[in-house]
Amino acid sequence: MGEIIRYSNGKIYIPPDEVERARRIGCLDYFRQSRNAELKRVGRDYCIKDHDSFRMSENGKWVWYSRNEGGNDAISYLMKIEGRTFQEACIEVLNAVPVNNEIRARQPQDDQPRKLDLPLKDDDSSMIRNYLIGKRAIDPEIVDYFIAKGDIYQDKKYKSVCFVGRDKDGIPRIVNVRGISSSFQNTAPGSDRSYGFNQYYPEKNSLHIFEAPIDMLSYLTIIKESGLNFKNFNMLSLSGIYSAKDVENSKKPKGLEKFLEEHQHIKEIYIHFDNDGAGINAAKAVMYLYQDYKVENQPPPKTYKDVNEYLINRDIRNVSRANGNDYRGR
């Protein structure tokens, strides 16, 4: 197999045989190999859980009915939906779906990171405030705190809510975008999945991890309602999760790895994943892979799918307890 060559001037060259292999990789194969989304069968096709209008077929084709988009392979998906360039899309799918033990495509060097394309910020925040506070039951002070920091803002074009994940120096590295009137979720083009929406507090050696930003904000709300200062906690949304059926073969989450690398005082990890198959398996994987840390699984009560569902429906008199665990944070 050839390999992707990076010339000294930064230009990336992909040999024609590798381009051809990338074109043969279907959207479904790509999602099976590289994405954390839970797939479900719908007739002869597959869709992502909570995204029924996005369908993928075994022949590689895909269609997103609500967005009037479709294509024949994974490359077309990455270009049309996630805004990747052709070369970026080729590299992504070649890395995601290697053939046997072939060398994977090399990403551009660290001195030339892909530029993060931040969605244009709206002058107003009223629609996302109504969504997060009114529909998701997030505490208004918490919402306004993150808006004031610039970590949450309203997309000018689609009025979606944007969650900005920063590195240890405060530089934006990833933007998770979520629709407020649909189940649409995506990451902004150029996002580095080694990062996630987070909050850093250097005086605490514990870290709470979540599948999505809204679950993180929900847990901060529970902390605040319990009388604690919500700002005094380390929090990280992993922007999705993944684990192999056999936890011994699971990979360490990139977002968690990067956060621990940049904040080496962390000694304890508390897991707050969803109460579904993917969340349960991913929690087991984290407990197995991070045995050098104190790791504790603290999912919401089993009758609730995730932390936000618990926040919306729980008995407010019992917000400090869940499944017998202290659910207020540590």
Image (cartoon, grey):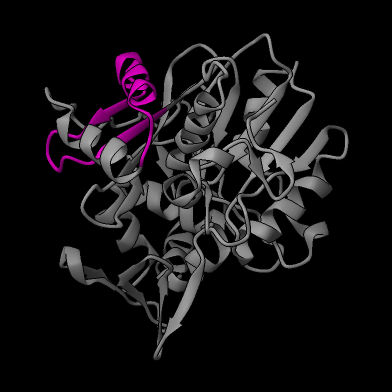
Q: Residue at x 11, y 22 (%)?
A: 123
| Residue 228 or residue 168, whichever sits in front | 228
On the picture, is 157 further left or further right than 179? left
On the picture, is 323 further left or further right than 57? right
Quadrant position of residue 190: top left
Residue 9, placed above or below residue 256: above
Q: Return the residue found at the far bottom.
A: 43
Q: Residue at x 50, y 36 (%)?
A: 216
Answer yes or no: is residue 26 visible.
Answer: no
Q: What is the x, y in percent for residue 57?
A: 39, 81
Q: What is the x, y in percent for residue 153?
A: 26, 27
Question: Is residue 142 found inside the magenta-colored segment of the image?
Answer: yes
| Residue 118 or residue 30, whichever sits in front | 118
Residue 185, placed above or below residue 38: above
Q: Return the residue found at the far front.
A: 317
Q: What is the x, y in percent for residue 148?
A: 30, 14
On the picture, is 64 further left or further right than 136? left
Q: Residue at x 56, y 50 (%)?
A: 105
Magenta region: 137-164
